[in-house]
Amino acid sequence: MKLSIVVPIYNEEENVEQLHEEIVRMCRYSKVCGEPFDWEIIFVDDGSDDRTPQVCKELKPLRYIRFRRNYGQTSAMDCGIKKATGEYIATLDGDGQNNPADIPRMIEYLIENDLDVVSGWRRNRQDPIKKKFDSRMANLFRQKMVHDGIHDSGCTLKIYRAECFRDVSLYGDQHRFIPAILKGKGYKIGEVEVNHRPRLHGETKYNFKRVFHGVRDLNELRLEHNHRNTKSQVYGYISGQMINSYYKKYGKDRYSIYEEIDNTEEVDQPEE
């Protein structure tokens, strides 16, 4: 099997080197279902204006993609997923709070339970009180509007079968609701508790504006689900118009790549 690890990053100059080291160590010395695996690491830089580009260009092995400007985490994730070549895709945050060591057991859980997606659940979050409160409210609101069956849709640490994205493009701020989007298309979703670590360097990119973006995307998603699950022509017309207008705004030319550097090298697998 081959695993693609996709990490959207933005102004994480103090975190990317250590995170990359942890990912490489996990990939080289871990096994999935008793077997070593092929892998690639993809960092998508969402227009950083600090030293993140300079640091990333020195990291190996790494596929480094840099946007011309800041387009948002969803665009960076969509780009990385589309560039991925593995049959499984892992996504995680670039701030170092997700632990790459959780990835192998998440893949095993996905395989053993015949799932298409496994979402991480940060049950013991290591975040400031305000961020945890805002996230909790957002999760409750999401669960009322879209029943995706998981506790923590906002956790970036997730495992996907690559085929989940064959006909899916992400735009707006949809990265928070990928399980709901995929469940609506018939994919099977699961959840595993994962480690969550304090942010050691830099500042969170989370702000209250993201709450409003989330409400907008939830309304969009709810209308789409209503359109799929009801015969109402009114819902069908409204959802169709909103989806079309939203895609015209965000779906076409959602991001522009400034540079793409392939610093991959032949990876020696650990001996069995």
Image (cartoon, grey):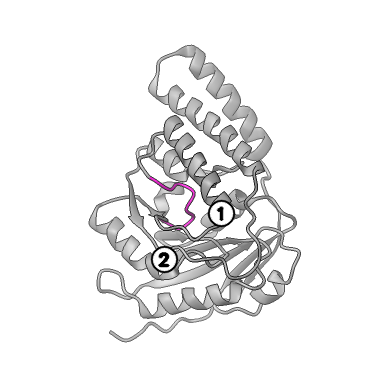
Q: Which residue lies furthest to the top in this view?
A: 233
Task: Decide whether residue 145 is among the magenta residues.
Answer: no
Depth check: give the residue in front, 167 or 80: 80
Name the kind of residue labelled 2 in the image.
Leu
Disc 2 target residue: 3
Location of residue 77 in the rendering, given as x and y in whole percent from the top left corner: 56, 54
Name the kind of residue labelled 1 in the image.
Met
Location of residue 252 in the rendering, given as x and y in whole percent from the top left corner: 66, 41
Q: How many labels does the image show?
A: 2
Depth check: give the residue in front, 209 or 166: 209
Disc 1 target residue: 77
- Element under disc 2: strand
Q: Which residue lies furthest to the bottom in this view?
A: 271
Does the residue at mark 1 contact the one at mark 2 (Cβ under 8 Å)?
Answer: no
Depth check: give the residue in front, 83 or 66: 66
Magenta residues? 151-159
